[in-house]
Amino acid sequence: MSTPEFDQVLQVTPPRFTREEAFTIAAETFGVSATGVEDLGSERDQTLMLVGTDGPLAVMKISNPAEDPEVLDMEALVALHARRADPTLPVALPRLAPGHGSGDDPAAYRVRFDAEDGSHFVRMYDVLPGRGRFDATTLSDAAVSNWGQITARLGRATRGFFHSKAQRTMLWDVQHAPRTRALLPDVRDPGQRAMVERVLDRFDEVVAPVWPILRAQVVHGDLTVDNALIDDDGMITAIIDFGDMGHSALVTDVSSILDSLVVDREPEEIFRVARLVLDGYQRVTPLEPIELRILGELLATRSAVTIAISSWRVAKGLENAEFAGRYNGSVARTIEVILDAGWDEVARRLGSPGRPSPDLAERRTRALGPAMEPLTYEHPITMASARGVWMTDTEGRTYLDAYNNVPCVGHSHPRVTEAIARQSRLLNTNMRYLHAAAVELAERLIATCPPGLDTVLFVNSGSEANDLAWRLATTYTGNRGGLCTAMAYHGISDAIAPLSPETWPASRPPQHIEAWEPPDTYRGLHADPSVFAAALERLAARDHAPAAAILDAVLTSDGFYDLDPALVQTWVRLTHEAGGLWIADEVQGGHGRTGDAMWSFQRHGIEPDFVTLGKPMGNGHPVAAVITRREIAERFAEETVFFSTFGGNPVSAAAGLAVLDVLEDERVLPRVVLAGEALRAAIREVASRHPAIGDVRGMGLANGIEIVSGPASSEPDGAGAAAIKDRLREHGVLVGSTGHAGNILKVRPPLAFTTAEVPVFAAALDAALGAG
Ligand code: PMP
């Protein structure tokens, strides 16, 4: 019985001409006079090596009588196209038949030959070097990786090709896998049949729904060990058959080679070899996340299809039962290993991030220990992805991110991620070699600063930037004392932790540091310049002259108070008068956070001696910098030299440049002003109904909501703020908390936050407060 909806060539007996007939055919069609033949084996054609007295002459393919000549034309054209697109790919090319036309006419590569069983088309191919019929398990690691690369190159070489016959129902193409259910009755072994069914069920459930969004093109579809020749090292020397080609998902090429290369291996080896193949493939063509996610299913499907088709062909008398049985047994073991491991685990082992393990938090504690900052929220969120101002957890829940300032221009901004990926594919090295990216970044940063700030040093984190600024300051001034605000945080290093009272051990305030209280604009406290002068005096009383004072001008850790420029100018003047330098820490307030200026110190009309940059500078990629005056750098250079291995590397610099580009091109700063104003107005409107909100303040998208213990009270309510933060999370919004009492909600979203998100935030805040 013929199954009409399938490609007919799989259902009709292949030609079986005798040796003498083959000689006649070769001579009559292509004028090749052979003295010997060797059967090279074929599922649907008769493929013969023609041999003369001096050795091999050509490979002759006598097509199946059911073959559509236009399909053969497509095979000729694709081989010629691939060779043109990638001339070093060893694609076997068809020969022009003598007297049949020119190379532009695909029909000139085939000659019709009529026999008793019908018409056949004869094609002649050059003999390429290499050997076939080898065992895939003997291939070295380098060879399987190379196999992946060649497959990807072939995919690239055919991606610009199309032919109307490329849309076909070739059963080996896994996109038609559901049709092979009709063949299941021919799978004799009940265990194998059940396995094939399970795989086809999984295909229907997981693969079929995403099929329309997979990258598709004309693919070879079958670069298996049967369709390639190799050299002594196992490297492909010839790609010899396009018989299964068609328009399909690109990734089907990968599943077909995996199916062929991992067969007959131990379970662990199956995955290791598959990863090597994938690595090779992805050196040329990186797979998309969705392709990687379904790759296990595609591999299993390809194996399942193999069992179904060959069992069916055995039943039709088209294939040798013993050989098919042996091969099906091997393929079935691949499926077994996949099913035993489980689909998620297979995806993970093939390089796709799997589902989170439920004990991840315990594993974190076990591996990272108690010094690590605890997770946020009692039931921590396991994040999976993020885009713009939206973050998605592994359960698929999406949150409005009103907290994270690092992804300054928005999570995963494509211009930044592309810049990073592109540069890291090209080159990543250090500043001992000349490279334009860091130099250009330095120039562009200098251009954003007042004229005196003309020298940039690159490091890798905000802590390092402040550490280096501190070192430059102590070197320049010869002083060792320092000043910072009362709840400041400036970093983790041995020099900077003392300038971070937020993390001071209560019992051991550092001797050489003094903290000053910034003005509390809500309660009308500490507004007088004498507060700062007193800190300087306390320092002097302990015999310390200041090397530097450091300020985050949006006061993130102290509580987002909007500072009076005149007051800040006084602080800077007093510091300079005492012999110290001024560090503007722009790790929080910089890169447009306040909207009115690139750097928050610019709001205050001061000229700092150092500008330190971090977090948002690379939109999540670690990169940081110190911008300072030339004479300060010169003093340092008299004593030593600065070099940091990763500082200014081309990838980090590319990230930094991309962030600056986006800030400019998307006109981010004016957008921040509008979004910030709308946000504060909306929060104030919510506050009018909720006395727990004592104050709403901020600059641009650096904002604080002060939670107090009730009507007419300005008593900080840290526990209340923590509860609201938790409830906001339940309502899909992420914020932080800050301040002495932890009672100030930190609303500091990526700068991709626009007025469009303001109502979402306000509604969630209203709901979170209402529940209290
Ligand atoms: N300065 C300020 C103002 C900061 O907020 C931080 C980090 N929160 C740092 C410096 C330290 O940056 P990093 O964590 O990148 O070392």
Image (tube, helix red, strand yellow):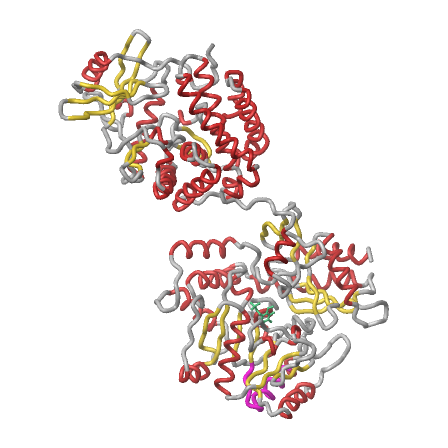
* Residue 492 percent across, percent down from the top left: 58, 71
Q: Residue at x 41, y 43 (%)?
A: 276
The question of residue 575 being in magenta is answered with: yes
Which quarter shows the C terminus?
A: bottom right
Q: Is residue 565 visible?
A: yes
Q: Residue at x 24, y 33 (%)?
A: 129
* Count of picture labels: 0
Magenta stretch holds residue 508: no
Residue 122 location (% of width, % of height): 27, 18
Q: Quadrant of residue 220?
A: top left
Q: Residue at x 82, y 55 (%)?
A: 771
- Quarter location, residue 343: top right
Tell which residue pokes out farthest to the top in this image. Answer: 116
Q: Classify 425 as above or below 508.
A: above
Q: Is residue 725 left or right of residue 477?
A: right
Q: Residue furthest right?
A: 711
For residue 171, side relative to residue 344 (left or right)? left
Residue 108 visible at all:
no
Q: In the depicted view, which residue is nearer to us: 429 or 771?
A: 429
> Quadrant location of residue 769?
bottom right
Q: Which residue is drawn at the image coordinates 57% and 76% (left, top)?
A: 496
**Residues drawn in magenta:** 568-582
Report the side of 492 relative to 13 (left or right). Answer: right
Q: Nearer the viewer, residue 303 or 630?
A: 303
